Image (cartoon, rainbow, N blue to C red):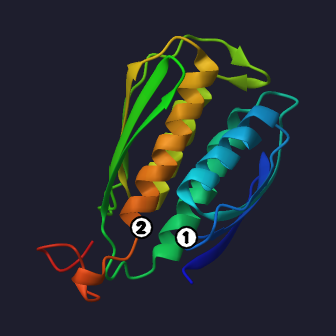
Amino acid sequence: MREAVVKRTTKETDISVEICLDGTGKVEAETGVPFFDHMLNAFGRHGLFDLKVKAVGDIDIDAHHTVEDTGIVLGQAIARALGDKLGIRRFGSAFVPMDEALLHAALDISGRGQLHWSVDLPFGMVGAFDTQLAKEFFIALATNAGITLHVREISGENAHHVIEASFKAVGRALREACEIDPRMEGELPSTKGML
């Protein structure tokens, strides 16, 4: 089982993440930001990752530090759980519709963490979640997991639907990329011999 536990404490947040990449989608998320908990549940459920997230942050100011730092810790946990990356499929892609919204996520477990975000979210709030925080979360996740991540909105109007479809799409794409390919026979999927 490819698993990891990562903890990070700063003056702004105290976060712990446990992940099993070979799970069944069981998620426990407690961040103090209910909509963000809902998104982490969607990510884990559709990625089939067993995930426990406990975050205490300065949400009396706003949710920015809590959401961004959770992305950092989750990204580090994913990288640690992937280990030597032998035999992984490496690439993953998923289209996810949610009512009027259609999102596409494509990623490469490349070791070069970066986000390319083509999602037109209006500024506003979904519960206590600032819509701008979706991008901040995925920047932190991609950077710390060492993945090249593209998230593209094909259609959408409702911010809740667009954000939720993006979390589901990234979860499904990551699930595909993390899967072990039996045809790889334990080799790295790279012409360089390293990722």
Task: Check the picture and name the quadrant holding the N terminus.
Answer: bottom right
Residue 87 locus on image (x, y percent) = 31, 80
Crowding at label 1, few (<14), some or many (≥20) Cα neighbours within 10 Å? Answer: many
Q: Residue at x 63, y 53 (%)?
A: 45
- Quarter assignment of residue 28: bottom right
Residue 7 locus on image (x, y percent) = 72, 67
- Quarter assignment of residue 64: top right
Which residue carries the number 2 mark? Answer: 178
Q: Report the label total.
A: 2
- Mark pair 1, 2: CA separation: 7 Å
Tag 1 and tag 2, C-beta contact below 8 Å: yes
Compare residues 60 and 119 and report the one nearer the observer.
119
Residue 165 locus on image (x, y percent) = 53, 33
Q: Which mark is residue 21?
A: 1
From the viewer's perspective, is 58 left or right of 141?
right
Q: Residue at x 31, y 76 (%)?
A: 181
Q: Quick one: SS at disc 1?
A: loop
Q: Which mark is residue 151?
A: none
